[in-house]
Image: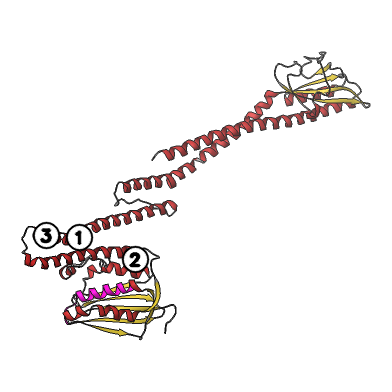
Amino acid sequence: MKRSLFLKFLLAYILFGVLGFVSIARLSSDMTYRYLIREQANNLYSEATLISTSYSDSQSLYLSEEMINEQMKAVSTFLHVEIWLVDRDGMIISDSRQELKKGQTIQSFDPTMTGNQRYLEGDFHGMFSEPVLTVAAPITRGYSTRGYVLIHMPVQNILASQFEILNIVYITGLIIFLLSLIILLVFYIIVYRPLRRITEGAMRYAEGDYSYRIRSRSHDEMGYLAETLNFMSEEIAKADDYQRQFVANISHDFRSPLTSIKGYLEAILDGTIPKELEEKYLLRLIAETERLTKLTQSMLSLNSTEQKGLLMRTNFDINRVIKEVCASFEMTCRKKNMTFELTFAARKEMVYGDYAKLQQVLYNLIDNALKFSDPSTSILIRTGRSGTKVFVSVKDSGIGIRKRDLQKIWDRFYKTDQSRGRDKQGTGLGLAIVKSIVSAHGENIDCVSTEGVGTEFTFTLPAAQQEIG
């Protein structure tokens, strides 16, 4: 495959050159021959007419005028032709070639033999051993035809001129063909060689070597294709790494509750756990199954929010939603002696979005804030308006997030080391779901955190399309 494209192009190029040369040779040969025949015939006819005029002005048809005969011989020598002077019956009266054919009669002589073309090709009634070009001009005197001047030129003379012209055509065509090899060189450098590198890269990617990079210095379509494939390999490598991490994380998160469930059930079956404690451990089993259910529901929720077009947008008061979500954490706040500080710029802050999903965003953010905050602290929640955007902020006074972990907290199943210490029941999907829902609304969410001080999440929402009083 690597060689076939260039080989095909080379063969097509050679075939094109050969066919073009043959076609040009054939056409130019025929056209040149016809052109030379016509031109020579016209020239010979002019000479024949000039000689016939001289004889028409003389007093006799016979060779009584020496100057006319000398003129005929001079023309014959100069043009390399044979000139005859014949009477009306076709008898040769005079011959420019030392009177060799003088006195002979042309068989089947026809004065109109040349027709409208003014010339005739062939052996002229068998009187020449080689083809000749013949023209005839009448000699008239007193409004009557007394004879004819015939001029014969060997076709071989015309062919010699034709070969000289064709040699020029062939040499010119060869030079053009050789110069056109530059096209082949340009194709090899600009198209074939980059395409070969791209093909090699595609094969390496197909074999799973995503670290391979296609080298390209051009800024044309080939360069763009190479850069696109390089970018594709990077994205595939990231997806591959994510898939492995996803499988490892989900295996870890499912393995822990499943191991606990299996252990408790085996202990109950073999009598390790006394009858009076079975209820206690059955409750633990229920808690572990609830953990699995929560993990599964979180994964399904994340997948659904990543699909666009599933948002059920309405206008609603985000302040009221915040109050409702905070109320659902009342028992948790009592256990940890924590409070919520709500700061709203307006009594109502109408937004346009998916009520249920944004409720989930607030639930996940507040849940994280409570988990990672010390007891007897407060969670600060603020809302405000900036132009056509409404911002919501959730700030805690917890353990914070290390700077190196800030860019990874949005990844699925990612947990910081501090998180694993405090949130053993977490799925690692909460912030990924938050990010996905906010992005589905076409908005952004940011995180500012200082380790040991606290964390603040701020996201924006589109203001309501119509204010509701």
Q: Which residues are magenta?
A: 357-377
Q: Quadrant of the N terminus?
A: top left
Q: Which residue is under mark 3? A: 263
Horizontal side, residue 78 vs residue 180: left or right: right
Magenta part, dominant SS: helix
- Badge 1 or badge 3: first in the primary sequence: 1
Identify whether 262 is placed above or below 361: above
Q: Which residue is under mark 1? A: 254
Question: What secondary structure is found at the residue carrying circle 2?
Answer: helix
Question: What secondary structure is found at the residue carrying circle 3?
Answer: helix
- Badge 2 or badge 3: first in the primary sequence: 3
Q: Quadrant of the C terminus?
A: bottom left
Expressed as whole percent of the image width and height from the top left, the position of residue 345 reads 34, 85
Expressed as whole percent of the image width and height from the top left, the position of residue 107 reads 81, 15
Q: Residue at x 63, y 33 (%)?
A: 28
Question: What secondary structure is found at the residue carrying circle 1?
Answer: helix
Residue neighbourhood size for the residue with mark 1, other residues' Cα within 10 Å, grouped as few (<14), some (14–19), many (≥20) = some
Amino acid on which disc 2 is placed? Thr
Q: CA distance from mark 1 to mark 3?
A: 14 Å
Expressed as whole percent of the image width and height from the top left, the position of residue 221 reads 44, 52
* Towards the viewer: 81 or 389: 389
Q: CA distance from mark 2 to mark 3?
A: 36 Å
- The disc label shown at residue 305, or none: 2
